[in-house]
Amino acid sequence: MVEITQSTLVTPSEETPKHKIWLSNLDVITARGYTPTIYVYPSIGVKYFFPVEAMKAALAKALVIFYPLAGRLSRNPETGRPEINCTGEGVNFYTAELDATLDDFTDFAPSAEMRKKLVPVIDSADPPCVMMVLQMTRLRCGGIILGFAIHHYAFDGRGASLFIKTISAFARGDTGTIPAPFFDRSLLRARSPPSVSFDHSDYTPKVIQSNISSNTSSQVVCSNLKLTKEQIQSLKSLAGGERVSTFRAVVAHVWKCTCIARGLASDQETQLLLPVDLRGRFKPPLPTTYIGNPTLRTKAVAKVEDLVNNTLEFGANLIQNAVDNITDEFGRSLIDHLESTDLEALCKRGAMSNTSLMAVSWLSMPMYDADFGWGEPLLMARAQMYGSGYVYLSKVPAMGGGISVIIGLEPDSMQCFKKILYEEIEALRPTSYSI
């Protein structure tokens, strides 16, 4: 049982700009909710380990730079469109104690129970609402878990990484390398007049809803599975060799295994949804510290029998082709298309249908660049999934090139999935013979 020991409203340590931030079409259609993430720090046996007042002070300083987070999500009184009202009201900071040790958590697999214990739950993500909350939980073993719930309209994973890096830099007293965030989202305004040059039928309420299952979050079981550097190399060898990225090789394997574990018919069509970061794809590129959600979804589609019976290279190529199709003009065309679409109907998320999978890469994000003065986190992960059919890939520094595959599936599919995932890789290992 978690016990909240203190609740404080932390405000920026200095006066901050007071204005409203317009949200782009890509912001408004992103999942309307709070992204629950945890950063886990084992005790290192020092007396002053994550002192509360020092953490509050670091957060207050970070909120001067990331001042929109101290504001509130509101609606434009004339258009009804969501916007961030930079009011400087502050962020709720909770301290808590939990009678548990790090060993009591099973690989920190995301779950509603873990979210409830470690990350504050906010009643609604619809405006008016806060932009973020933070909970610092001290365990019986002396370990610390930081639980963040940040509204997705604030930023994507890259923005979140920069924000956490900023807080940790202030906590360490190392403020010389903090890059300035870029908050102006007008770079992603629709063109006038709009010019739609591609088929964006996937971005219609009907298609979005067809991808979502009737499953609820209680009908999902999550696992945090580890792949070693050697296992990844085995997958790459089947997916096309070193030219193939870790993400493509692993996700192609995961996609194939989920189709088998779910017992899909050979003639069914399966789709893999892939978020694509547009920062470097726009011409000119967006600033590297652009804060927002400059992402869109593309998809790879195949018949189950083709995906399962072909080599891993088949699935890896489908993934590459889907991503290669995303260009500057495609992104601009989508933004223009969304001008005449019901954006509110596109921001809903839930469990994927059992023929679909959403794969998200955190491999290139500096998620572990969060040293508050006592070392990098042992683990960084989501505390809860949207539902079944989502998979996240992230690095595990302690594994020396290994990665974590965090996946949510239907309960009756997970055991089979885990078995196939590793058996297929084991079959690729060379066999030793004794003479």
Image (cartoon, rainbow, N blue to C red):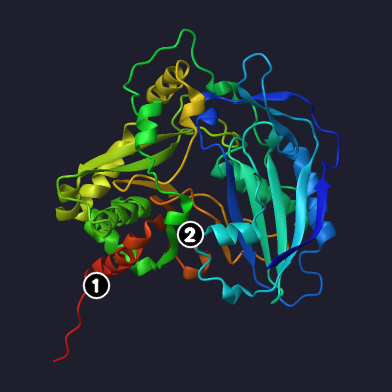
Seen at 38% across and 41% down, the residue is 274
| Left or right relative to 308: residue 360 | right
User: From the viewer's perspective, is residue 192 above or below residue 214?
Assistant: above
| Residue 121 percent across, percent down from the top left | 65, 50
Q: Which of marks 1 and 2 is nearer the N terminus?
A: 2
Q: In which quarter of the image is the C terminus?
A: bottom left
Q: Mark 1 points at which residue?
A: 429
Residue kind at label 2, given as amino acid type? Lys
In the depicted view, which residue is nearer to us: 256 or 416? Answer: 416
In terms of secondary structure, where does tag 1 sit? loop
| Residue 319 percent across, percent down from the top left | 30, 43
Q: Is residue 327 visible?
A: no
Q: Mark 2 points at which residue?
A: 395
| Residue 8 percent across, percent down from the top left | 82, 51
User: From the viewer's perspective, is residue 353 above or below residue 259?
Assistant: above
In the depicted view, which residue is nearer to us: 124 or 433? Answer: 124
Seen at 30% across and 42% down, the residue is 320
